[in-house]
Each structure stands twice: as structure tokens, then as C-alpha cells.
Amino acid sequence: MIELGVDELTLVLQLPLSVKAKMDPSDWPCLAEYMMKRFICKARFEGIFGEIRPECRPPMGYDIGFSFGEHNFFLAIAYHQIRGDMGVAIKFSAQALDYYTEKSGMKVYEFLKAVQDKAYTTRLSRVDLTADYIDEDIDVTDIYQSFIDNKAAVFREFRNKKTGEKSYRRCDLEYQGFLKGQEVPTIYLGSAQSNSRLRIYDKKREQIERNGTKLAKARACKNWVRFEGVFRHEFAHQIGENLLTVTNDNEYANLIANIMIQKFRIMVIDKGVIEDDTEYIKLLMSYISNQTFILKAPSSRNYDIAKSLTHLFFGSGAVSTLYKIRSIWGEEAVKKVLDFIYDYLKEYEPNDDCRYWLRKNANDYRINYPSFDSFMRENIAPRL
């Protein structure tokens, strides 16, 4: 199946032109605060994420920022004290957007409609669209090899203004693959500086290697490849305008699929001549015509402790060291080492990073795992 969705986004609020024309620069901080309050109320941020608080690391370029609640993901609303032209930015990380859509019950197009207000205008400055191929036996290394062998390329549709005739022109986008062993699990198509760029990668592998937030989902499927289009500036503005016209989930999925195909239609070529669409593009096109879409299921789980414990068991050498101690001095020696660690922990003074992590993450862990046994069963036991 294919799941279509939005991975992350940045939304910018601007003053209406009628207000901006009359504004004195010294009025900007007050106006920015007013816009923020209106937006926060419309978006129900405090009800969904928690109490507003200062954000010490606002989005790049902004100097006054706020976040909400205590979470492991990044969500911030910010403005610059003297740069009114930069507006008010709301930046969702992928996990923050998952959390918001899950808790609010709204898709991205519904969220954008819900936050409209006479006090400001809205536009997207960045949006990442995704097409997830789950159990479709797509191999990222094979896709990369087809580009290397000049057997596939990106094409875009053009129409003759006079005749209306449709044709396809090849777009020689730069491509880059990242080799791991004998495989290429990640490909980038397009320049990092461009308004649109495509990343194709093995999502299942990424989630397992990083103990990601979709780890359980990754384990449950045989294979999972993600096509992720990153759109900025003018392209993001246009996508935002189109999302405001969407009225249901089918239109939402159609819009995402159509944009991905419009910008990144990968076709099979032979000696420079188009033969056909690639199988994975055909599959995406068939979903458009059939309108059988499954939007991605959000998940806001955090696997930081699982990463640390996995490293402790398998990567740090701790278990190997304990085994050596037991082999030389016996079981009692191992118990003494563990007792020593436990006593040391009682006197341990955590640093600021540790305290900050606990403030941001402890509550989410308690919600997702009511007991430590449930945490171990899901995250550690399958690896032992």
C-alpha cells in the first residue's frame, strides 16, 4: 500500500497589507504578540501541547520564541523584535506534527483552515510531502543504479500554449547516493539550495538503525521505502494555497500524489528515449485514479532510552565486561559490581543536559509506557 502525508512544515503569519502600511516599526513587537495569541487560540496549542513557555532555541533568524509543554520534539512559535517583514513563524518538526494531528484529530489541510484569522495572513515557507511504499518490494539501491546506468530520469510535463499538445522534458537533476556496505539506502534528487528536492530512502532500515519514533511500525512490515519531497519558498506557498481548497481526505491525498508526480516523475529510458513510467510511479498514479488512499498514522513515541539501553547491552561492551568478571571471580563479583553502580547512582548529580531531557521527555514516557515492564517488553525484549 501507499500512505500519503505531510512530514513537517513551517507556517509564517504576516500582518494584513492594510495594517502593515500604517504600522510604525516600534509597534511590531506588540502586533506580533497579538498575532501569536490569536493563532495559539485558534490552533488550541496550549490545550494540545501544554502551557506556553520561553523557547531558548527559536527557529533560525528569529530571536523571541516560545514552545508548549514538555516534549522531546521541536515545536516553536517565534518572531524577530525588529524584523516585522519576517512575520511570526510556527515550526513543526515531523514528530511534533504527528503529535498535533493525532491529538487534534485534524489533517494538515484542516489545521490550516482552522487557524485562518482576520488579524493575519498565512503561508507555508516549507512543507515536506511523503509517499510511503509499504510492502511493495521497492529497492532503493536498484533505483540509484537505474540513474547511474542512465536507465531512468526525472521528467516534467509541458504543454504547447498554441496547440495544447502535451510533451515531457527531461530534468537533469543532480543526484547523490549514500553507500552503506553494498547498498545505497538513501538517494537525493535535486540541489539542497533549490525550492524542491526529493529524498528516497529505506524508511524501515532508518527506523531500526535509529530506534526511531516509528520503530514498531517498521518492525511490523517487510519493507518500507519513503519518497519525501521537500518544498520551500514559492513552491511551499503554492502548496499552502492549494491545501486551503481541499475539502476531504481523498482530495488531500490526491493533491499530495499529484504534486509528487508533477515535480518528480521518474520514467524509464532507453538510449535517451522514454519507454514508460517506472513501476513505482505507475503505482502512485494508480492510487490517484482509484482514490484508495491510506493517510499515514501518526505516532509520537520516543525511543531515546531504548537507544541508550540497546547500546548498553550490545554496543558498549558492558555485558562483555560483566561476563569476564563472572568468568574470573564468579557470580558474587558481578553482584558487587551491580551493587556498586546502584550505590553510585544514589549519589549521582545529573548535569543540565540530563535535567533538560527529563523535563522534555519524562511525561511522554509515562503516558506511552505506564510501567517499566511494558517499556522493556516492547523495546528491549525483542532484541535479546
Image (cartoon, helix red, strand yellow):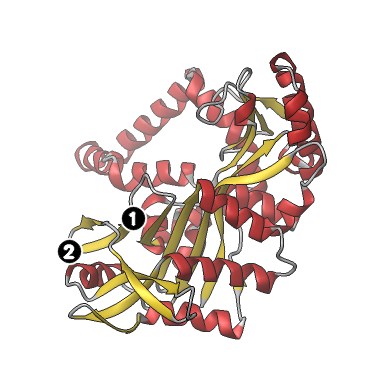
| Within-10-Å neighbours for mark 1: few <14, some 14–19, many 20+ | some
| Within-10-Å neighbours for mark 2: few <14, some 14–19, many 20+ | few
Nearer to us in this view, 373 or 171 = 171
Between the residue at mark 2 and the residue at mark 1, the CA separation in whole angstroms equals 23 Å
Q: Residue at x 19, y 38 (%)?
A: 328
Res. 29 image quadrant:
top right
Q: Is residue 37 left or right of residue 65?
A: right
x then y, percent, for residue 128: 51, 54
Q: Amino acid at mark 1?
A: Gly
Q: Is residue 165 visible?
A: yes
> Hey, which residue is sitting farthest front in the picture?
162
> Hey, which residue is sitting farthest top in the picture?
26
Q: Is residue 221 visible?
A: no
In the image, residue 117 sits, relative to residue 131, either above or below, namely above
Q: Which residue is mark 2?
A: 182
Query: Which of marks 1 and 2 precedes in the sequence?
Result: 2
x then y, percent, for residue 379: 48, 54
Nearest-to-viewer mark from 2 and 1? 1
In the image, residue 210 sits, relative to residue 216, either above or below, namely above
Q: Which residue is mark 1?
A: 190
x then y, percent, for residue 26: 71, 13
In the rendering, which numbered label is found on residue 370? none
x then y, percent, for residue 212: 46, 52
Q: Residue at x 27, y 74 (%)?
A: 152
Check disc 1 and report its element: helix, strand or loop: loop
Check disc 2 and report its element: helix, strand or loop: loop
Q: Amino acid at mark 2?
A: Gln
Nearer to us in this view, 270 or 224 = 270
* Quadrant including the C terminus: bottom left
Callouts 2 and 1 close, C-beta under 8 Å: no
Nearer to us in this view, 195 or 99 = 195
Q: Is residue 292 left or right of residue 233?
A: right
